[in-house]
Amino acid sequence: MPAKTASPRNDRRRTRSARERCSFNRREAAYFADVSVRQVDKAIEEKVVRPWRPDVRLIYLDRDDVVTIAVLAKTGLQLPKQTKRQIHKWVRSSFEERPVKHRELSLSNILVLRLDPAIVSMADQLDAYRERRERYISSDLEIQGGEPVIAGTRLPVSSVATRLDRGDSLDDLAADYPGIPKTAFEAARIYADAHPRRGRPARPWRDG
């Protein structure tokens, strides 16, 4: 009797690599670093950060890449590429352990960078979003045609974002969907903005 082959209908859930699950796309990076996508692209083009590219269409950055972009934006300075790369190396070494070490970097006798609490908090928010994204957001071709939804439901993340855009609060959503925690709606909002549906223009996110 011939061996059974896997049915395409049983293998429609997209498998994401561990590295992809731990990374952020360009729009997610821009959101958390509070910069434009163009600034993210500039850091990539200058090789200040070195993203992971599983194929020519996809670009992923890790947490330390995003933190570096945020630090560079906060300086408000036009720095040489080599200095920017030095800052990236410092950020990566600083977040190797918690609590964060190497909070200061001396660039010259008069210029010293510090990791302020807001930057450390942003790194924590990145970690929290990454965990919530994996816990609460799912995509399966047999559910809503593969449109990303809140896991365990048929509620598209785009619908969550639309309601919040129209003035509904997280409390409003929690009242309508009592089985879903507020943190899931927060993750859905960020995810929807960072992964616009095909045919729908992406939010500018300070691209101008």
Image (cartoon, grey):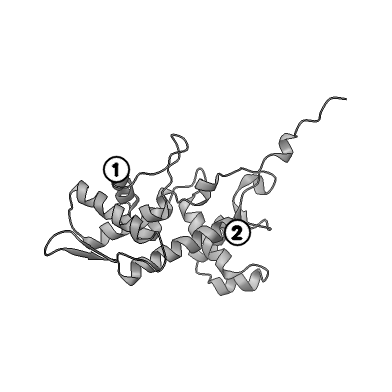
**Secondary element type, mark 1:** loop
Look at 32% across and 51% down and name the residue there: 207
Q: Position of residue 15 (x, y in %)?
A: 61, 43
Between residues 127 and 100, which one lies in front from this camera angle? 100
Which residue is the extreme one toward the top? 2
Q: Position of residue 155 (x, y in %)?
A: 64, 58
Look at 35% across and 55% down and name the residue there: 92
Q: Is residue 188 among what the camera can see? A: no
**Secondary element type, mark 2:** helix
- 130 sits left or right of 138 in the view: left
Is 170 drawn above or below residue 132 in the view shown? below
* Figure quadrant of residue 67: bottom left
Residue picked out by circle 2: 135
- 175 sits left or right of 89 in the view: right
Q: Amino acid at mark 1?
A: Lys
Q: Position of residue 104 (x, y in %)?
A: 25, 65
Between residues 200 and 47, which one lies in front from this camera angle? 47
Is 10 drawn above or below residue 97 in the view shown? above
* Figure quadrant of residue 114: bottom left
Q: Position of residue 91 (x, y in %)?
A: 32, 58
Residue picked out by circle 1: 47
Look at 45% across and 51% down and name the residue there: 24
Q: Amino acid at mark 2?
A: Arg
Q: Earlier in the sequence, mark 2 or mark 1?
A: 1
Is 11 drawn above or below residue 162 in the view shown? above
Between residues 126 and 205, which one lies in front from this camera angle? 126
Q: Is residue 37 among what the camera can see? A: yes
Q: Quadrant of the N terminus?
A: top right
Q: CA distance from mark 2 to mark 1?
A: 32 Å
Between residues 52 and 208, which one lies in front from this camera angle? 52
